[in-house]
Image: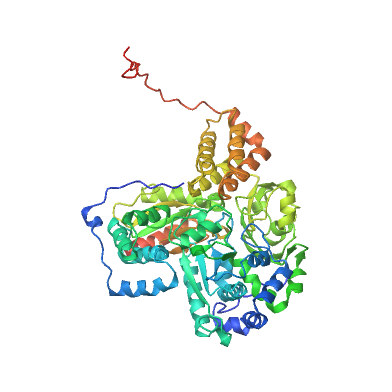
């Protein structure tokens, strides 16, 4: 069972967010897809993560209020799934697959290299806030091992040289 | 064999509806609307198509369990959660031929008279969720979905619902909970989803690959489908081969080929000229097979007879450099992370196995450890938990311990005791207050 550390939220993070007209338009598209408002929790959380960057306690409260749920219920949903960011993420979240095929086809070497190059361990961010390293379970790309998902995109059939080139490019963009 | 499900792989612009229509796409949907729901179900039943998600349950029978006289809505759910380690076939279908999935969803919805279908796709598959959404929009624009499809009077809406990172949501009842906006906790069965499914209504959940087979069955007929493979194990199947092979990838082959043929011919054999040591035949939750068992046929019944399962068709190959204790440890880490935590045998058992295996790997194994692992596995499988995740970690770990016990014993023989932390000895605090002594 995955567990998350409980982190005290800053006063700003607790502030309930407001949904602008664009968000409301997207919510209006979502709601008719389901017979209950509760079913829109996951898609609305995705919209919020896209819009606000992470799921702050203020986002949880806003989603709960918008869908007629308690904040505790929404928080329970958020904490169950691994992909909702419950703290502000780095600009690039490096999600390295650590499961069987990746582990035995070069994934371990990639992790060792990343830890050394970035000077961080799993779960940590670089001090400049550019990279964050996360060890994840099977990404469903075992035939293209080893695989890293960076934010939304898959990078497959990696080796250290390819990974370095990708990181150099991303670091240059920031 | 002539590719069926992967016929679009390598075709330029294969994802567009124009390419799909040029290859005879949506003909099955048109034909199905003319046949009527019962005839469609009968055709799928006769084809002996079995579910490709892992359990291998006959698809037509699953459809027929939906109560005929149900007054309310029904739902069709396409399971695109693809999370079993070693499995990457559904994304291959979606990548090259998303309309095949949309057409399968449409026909299956019609067969069970569902006017709403959800495609539940794992959260990590952002790219493939977009591909599906684009395909649905194209199909809707051409009148294959929406109100009064092709003048038939049948309405159908299809929505993509993204997960958010949870292996357990591939389990069908956890998936339904997740669509309903809840934590992905599997439900007790019965009632089965065909009777009480999503939003309390009859629901059929089929895997992407299963649904992709359906248009072909309708167009080419049940007899054609049943002529591929073996009796009761019919049709083409996508096999995903990963690990220590020369050409990892997805291969479409008739059910009943041997694992030897898949690994040696199609995947190019074990890489680096090394020897095959072991392989998972159907994802990491299937009991492991040894090199001596490589002539087993890759189908549902032959795998069951060999004490394992075809599962999702995810074949993970290990060469002779691999230490099986490490494999067991990696598997334990996966399932300990992914257990939803509802049932004690699974939540605690997977964690406990992980701790023991970590300790063995760290060089501190104890002689009793292999038997302790087997005992934990026994108490976590065979109906001790709400859903099959208890079996999913217990079966592979116990199979590795049983088949490669000597590797565990070798590590344990050279192990050193775990440095014990000195527990502080507390002075006796005296009798409980109130005893008056």
Q: Residue furthest bottom?
A: B151
Left or right placement of residue B198 versus residue A87 in this view: right
Q: Mark yes or no: residue B16 visible.
A: yes
Is any part of residue B5 visible from this angle? Answer: no
A165 sits to left or right of B219: left
Question: Where residue B434 sits: x, y (%)?
Answer: 31, 18
Asked whether A124 or B355 is in front, the reply is B355
Residue located farthest toward the left when viewing the structure as drawn:
A11
| Percent coordinates x, y for residue B1 in the rendering | 73, 70
Left or right: residue B426 versus residue B391 is: left
Report which quarter residue B49 is drawn in: bottom right
Image x and y of residue B321, in percent: 62, 44
Front residue (pair A12, B198):
B198
User: Is B432 in front, or is A93?
Assistant: B432
Residue at 74% across / 57% down in the picture?
A: B258
Colour convention of the picture: rainbow
Q: Residue furthest top?
A: B437
From what the image shows, is residue B411 above or below residue A156? Answer: above
Place of residue A21 in the rendered image (x, y in percent of width and height, measured from the top left): 28, 75
Quarter that holds the C terminus of chain B:
top left
């Amino acid at each position: 069972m995955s567990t998350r550390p409980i982190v005290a939220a800053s006063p700003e993070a607790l502030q309930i967010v407001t949904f602008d007209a664009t968000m409301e338009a997207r919510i209006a598209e979502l709601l008719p897809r389901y017979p209950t408002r509760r079913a829109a929790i996951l898609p609305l959380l995705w919209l919020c993560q896209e819009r606000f960057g992470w799921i702050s306690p203020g986002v949880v409260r806003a989603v709960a209020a918008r869908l007629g749920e308690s904040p505790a219920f929404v928080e329970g949903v958020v904490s169950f799934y691994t992909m909702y960011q419950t703290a502000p993420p780095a600009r690039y979240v490096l999600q390295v697959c650590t499961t069987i095929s990746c582990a035995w086809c070069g994934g371990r070497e990639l992790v060792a290299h990343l830890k050394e190059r970035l000077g961080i361990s799993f779960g940590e961010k670089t001090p400049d806030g550019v990279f964050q390293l996360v060890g994840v379970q099977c990404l469903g790309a075992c035939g293209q091992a080893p695989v890293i998902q960076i934010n939304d995109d898959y990078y497959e059939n990696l080796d250290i040289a390819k990974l370095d080139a990708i990181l150099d490019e991303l670091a240059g963009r920031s | 064999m002539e590719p069926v499900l992967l016929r679009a792989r390598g075709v330029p612009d294969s994802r567009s509806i124009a390419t799909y229509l040029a290859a005879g796409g949506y003909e099955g949907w048109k034909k199905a609307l003319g046949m009527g729901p019962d005839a469609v179900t009968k055709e799928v039943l006769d084809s002996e198509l079995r579910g490709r998600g892992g359990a291998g349950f006959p698809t037509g029978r699953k459809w027929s369990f939906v109560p005929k006289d149900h007054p309310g809505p029904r739902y069709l759910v396409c399971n695109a959660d693809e999370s079993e380690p070693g499995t990457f076939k559904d994304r291959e279908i979606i990548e090259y031929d998303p309309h095949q999935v949309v057409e399968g969803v449409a026909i299956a919805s019609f067969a069970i008279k569902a006017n709403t279908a959800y495609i539940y796709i794992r959260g990590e598959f952002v790219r493939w969720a977009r591909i599906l959404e684009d395909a649905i929009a194209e199909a809707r624009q051409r009148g294959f979905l929406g109100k009064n499809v092709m003048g038939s009077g049948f309405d159908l809406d299809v929505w993509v619902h993204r997960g958010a990172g949870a292996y357990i949501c591939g389990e069908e009842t956890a998936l339904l909970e997740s669509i309903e906006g809840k934590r992905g906790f599997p439900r007790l069965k019965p009632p089965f989803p065909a009777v009480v499914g999503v939003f309390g209504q009859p629901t059929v959940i089929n895997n992407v690959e299963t649904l992709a087979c359906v248009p072909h069955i309708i167009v080419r007929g049940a007899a054609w489908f049943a002529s591929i493979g073996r009796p009761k194990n019919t049709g083409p199947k996508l096999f995903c081969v990963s690990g220590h092979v020369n050409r990892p990838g997805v291969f479409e082959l008739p059910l009943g080929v041997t694992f030897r043929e898949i690994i040696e011919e199609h995947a190019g054999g074990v890489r680096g000229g090394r020897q095959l040591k072991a392989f998972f035949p159907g994802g990491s939750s299937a009991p492991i097979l040894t090199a001596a068992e490589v002539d087993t046929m890759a189908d549902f019944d032959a795998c069951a007879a060999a004490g394992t399962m075809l599962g999702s068709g995810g074949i993970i190959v290990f060469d002779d450099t691999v230490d099986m204790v490490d494999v067991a440890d990696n598997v334990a880490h996966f399932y300990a992370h992914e257990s939803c935590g509802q049932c004690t045998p699974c939540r605690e058992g997977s964690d406990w196995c992980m701790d023991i295996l970590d300790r063995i790997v760290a060089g501190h194994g104890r002689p009793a450890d292999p038997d302790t692992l087997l005992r934990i596995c026994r108490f976590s499988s065979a109906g001790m938990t709400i859903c099959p995740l208890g079996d999913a970690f217990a079966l592979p770990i116990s199979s590795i311990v049983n088949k490669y016990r000597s590797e565990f014993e070798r590590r344990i023989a050279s192990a050193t005791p775990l440095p014990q932390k000195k527990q502080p000895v507390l002075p006796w605090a005296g009798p409980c207050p109130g005893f008056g002594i």
